Image (cartoon, helix red, strand yellow):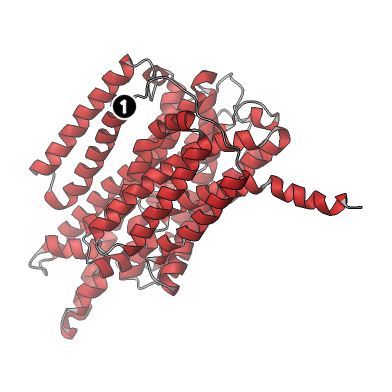
Amino acid sequence: MNQSPSQPESAMRKWIPLVAICLGTFMLLVDVSIVNVALPQMATDLHSSFTSLQWVVDMYALVLAALLMVVGTLGDRLGHRRLYLIGLVVFALASLACGLAPNAGVLIASRAVQGIGGAAMLTSTTSLLNAAYQGRDRGTAFGIWGAVSGAAAAVGPVLGGLLTDSIDWRAIFFVNLPIAAAAVVMSLRFLQNDAGRAGGRLDYAGALSFTVFAGSLTYGLIESAGDGWGSTTVLGSLGLAVLALIVFVVVESRSGNPLLDLSLMRNRTFAGLSIAALLLNAAAFAHLTYTSIWLQSVLGLSPIQAGLVVCPLAISSFVVASLSGKFFHKLAPQWPIGIGLILIGAGALLFSLVSTGSGWTVILPGLIVSGLGVGLATPIMMSSAMAAVPRQRAGMASGAINTGRQLGYALGIAVLGTVFANRIQSFVAASGQVADPHQAASALGGGRAGAVLAQVPADHRAAAEHLVHGAFAAGLDQVYLTAGIIGLVAGALVLLLVRRSDAPPPWAAAAEGGKPAEAAAGAH
């Protein structure tokens, strides 16, 4: 008699570890995209430049990408629960600093610290899930965690718009505090306290050289929009990136315990999937940053409206991803991944229908087609990469693919931002209506089109509005063309390089209670 009420309670308690892990995962992945719709308000409040806006978006993804592989090694030493808790606390404190930031510099620095916390959380999740669940429950847990990870991409712009519209842009960071607090309490009470273990020497040289490479390359690309490709700063940054990459290759080839075993790149399937991971986010998501600025500062949509406009991409992606396991699991991986990337490229090219007089509906076809491609390519990418390498390198493959995804997003923001700024500047200069095209382009790209137009005399307002709409259309079309080419090239490379592996997919072990099922780690 007394046992029946306790059975539902026991079943509920069983899933609390999953909730604790999903809260942290959702929070860190939402923060990749939640800032997009808040950029125009940030620019106004902080008086920030176009370059500063790029860094607000990019710094988080860049630090996340640079640290994923090395922080994963720390989890084995410190214990994954301890690392997860450290990540939650660091992320929460950095979110508080972001929300209180008095200027763009403090905000960008705080976003970097967020990336450190996010890397600690993301690298811990698969090990924590694997320790918390066995057998069929493990497969269920990874499935739910993967769905939550995917939903974060859809919820980010909408949640960001809702908070920015109803409260303030700072609320998109403050909302992390109660979520992190709840995750910390549940983690302390319900996650297993795994003790760290001694391991091989950490690859400090590899971690440092990779971080310098990623940071210098991104910095050079972003600064080229304002300083030009021939500036000392840009050339120096790109030169340092090349040098750091050479050092990384030399260090990894000689290390007994490398971050990335470079011999894996001789496997054409793994090499192709690594390229696909790097280019997917650049082609599918990076251009949405500049689309959001256009929707709000030029078309006059509110943040929540701008967030809702881009929802078709996430919705179509979610629908296709949900069906992919049922209909595409028997296909060789190059087909869903390659065709998915080609659809992403085609969707980006459809975006380029934007013209001077376009409204927001013109981008709907591109959003839907791109979403179909994301839903087709993403679910199988991680499991295919892990199945293509020796079992003892599965964790390394997972880290490499996750790193490629986040680094691709960071570099995509930088490259497309340079394309966007340069095209706007050349369009404004060609019009002959503006004395300082560079300053005007910076103001427009920085989300201050409304402020610029407000300073134009009433009798010249119509001509100025036409110029602004035309400049944005020209800039966006160049961005979408570049993203489309990236997607098409990535798809072609996958179709050429990737082949089915004879190894069993690593997620299969999850349903049977076997070794870790890190396949879901690539859900975002």
* Above or below, comparing residue 321 to residue 311 in the picture: above
Q: How many marks?
A: 1
Q: Quick one: SS at disc 1?
A: helix
Q: Position of residue 293 (x, y in %)?
A: 32, 63
Q: Is residue 90 left or right of residue 222?
A: right
Instruction: Name the foreground residue: 396 vs 225.
Output: 396
Instruction: Name the foreground residue: 230 vs 8.
Output: 8
Q: Position of residue 97 (x, y in %)?
A: 34, 58
Residue located 31% across and 69% down the image? 298
Residue 485 visible in the current orientation = no
* Above or below, comparing residue 32 to residue 272 in the picture: below
Residue located 49% across and 42% down the image? 84
Q: Position of residue 367 (x, y in %)?
A: 46, 55
Residue located 61% across and 31% down the image? 507
Q: Amino acid at mark 1?
A: Tyr
Residue highlighted by disc 1: 204
Q: Quadrant of residue 238?
A: top left
Q: Position of residue 418 (x, y in %)?
A: 23, 50
Instruction: Name the foreground residue: 113 vs 447.
Output: 113
Residue located 67% across and 47% down the image? 15
Density class for disc 1 (Cα within 10 Å; few <14, some 14-19, many ≥20) is: few
Residue 269 visible in the current orientation = yes
Query: Given the current orientation, which residue lies at the most extreme right position?
Result: 1
Q: Is residue 224 left or right of residue 18?
A: left
